[in-house]
Image (tube, grey):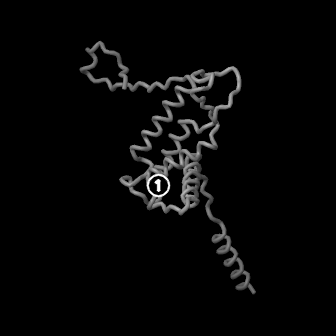
Amino acid sequence: MASDGAKDSAEGSSREQRSVQPVIQLSRYESQKRRDWNTFGQYLKNQRPPVSLSQCNCGHVLEFLRYLDQFGKTKIHLHGCTFFGHPEPPAPCTCPLRQAWGSLDALIGRLRAAYEENGGSSETNPFGGGAIRVYLREVRDCQAKARGIPYKKKKKKRVRSKADDNDPKPLLQAS
C-alpha cells in the first residue's frame, strides 16, 4: 500500500510538471509585431490568387498599406476642402479618414523586424525597399500639408571633440 501511495504521488508530481508551463508575457511591442505579422499573412492569403510569403514583394506591401487606409482614424483634408491646410478646423467636413503617417511608419518597422525573425533575409525584405520609403515620405508630406502642420526633421547633436572647443559654431547641426 505504501508503495501505491508513493507511486500515486510520483505520478501526480509528474502530471503537475507536464501541465505547468511558464506563461511568457510579451511586451507591447512584441504583441503588436505578432498581431501585425499575422494580419499581413492573412492579407496575403486573402488575395486572389493567394500570395505566399516567398512571392511577396514591395508591391504587395504598398497594396496592404493602401488597404489599411480604410481603417484609419486621422482626418486628411482634400485639396478642395475649405479646411485644407488648417491644423484645427472649426467644423466637421466630409474628408476621408486615413492611417496616420506615424502609424504606418511604426507598422513597417515592426513588419520589417518580424520578416527577418520569421526566416526572411534582410536582402530580400519587402518591407525595407526603397519604394516603401518613398511611399512613407509622400504620405508624411501630403498629410502635413493637408493638416497645415509642417513636418520638420529633428536636429541631431554633434559629438564635441577637442578641436571643437576652439570652434565658435553651435553644437546643434541641421541634418
Q: Quadrant of residue 79?
A: top right
**38 over 99 or under it: above or below:** below
Q: Number of labelled discs?
A: 1
**160 over 126 or under it: above or below:** above
Q: Of residues 69 and 153, which is closer to you in this image?
A: 69
Residue at image location 53% in from the left, 27% down from the top? 144
**60 over 98 or under it: above or below:** below
Residue found at the far front of this picture: 80
Residue found at the far top of this picture: 168
Q: Of residues 95 and 80, which is closer to you in this image?
A: 80
Quarter of the image with the N terminus in it: bottom right
Residue at image location 56% in from the left, 39% down from the top? 103
* Residue type at the position of mark 1: Tyr
- In the image, taking residue 33 as reference, residue 174 lies left or right, namely left
Residue found at the far right of this picture: 1
Q: Of residues 130 and 153, which is closer to you in this image?
A: 130
Q: Is disc 1 placed on a helix, strand or loop?
A: helix
Residue at image location 42% in from the left, 58% down from the top? 120
**168 over 58 or under it: above or below:** above
Where residue 135 sits in the image (x, y, percent)?
Answer: 46, 40
Where residue 33 sits in the image (x, y, percent)?
Answer: 55, 50
Where residue 65 sits in the image (x, y, percent)?
Answer: 53, 45
Quarter of the image with the C terminus in it: top left
Q: Quadrant of residue 14?
A: bottom right
- In the image, taking residue 66 as reference, residue 58 lies left or right, namely left
Q: Quadrant of residue 94?
A: top right
Where residue 146 sits in the image (x, y, percent)?
Answer: 56, 27
Mark 1, Cα crowd under 10 Å, few <14 / some 14-19 / many 20+, is: some
> Mark 1 = which residue?
115
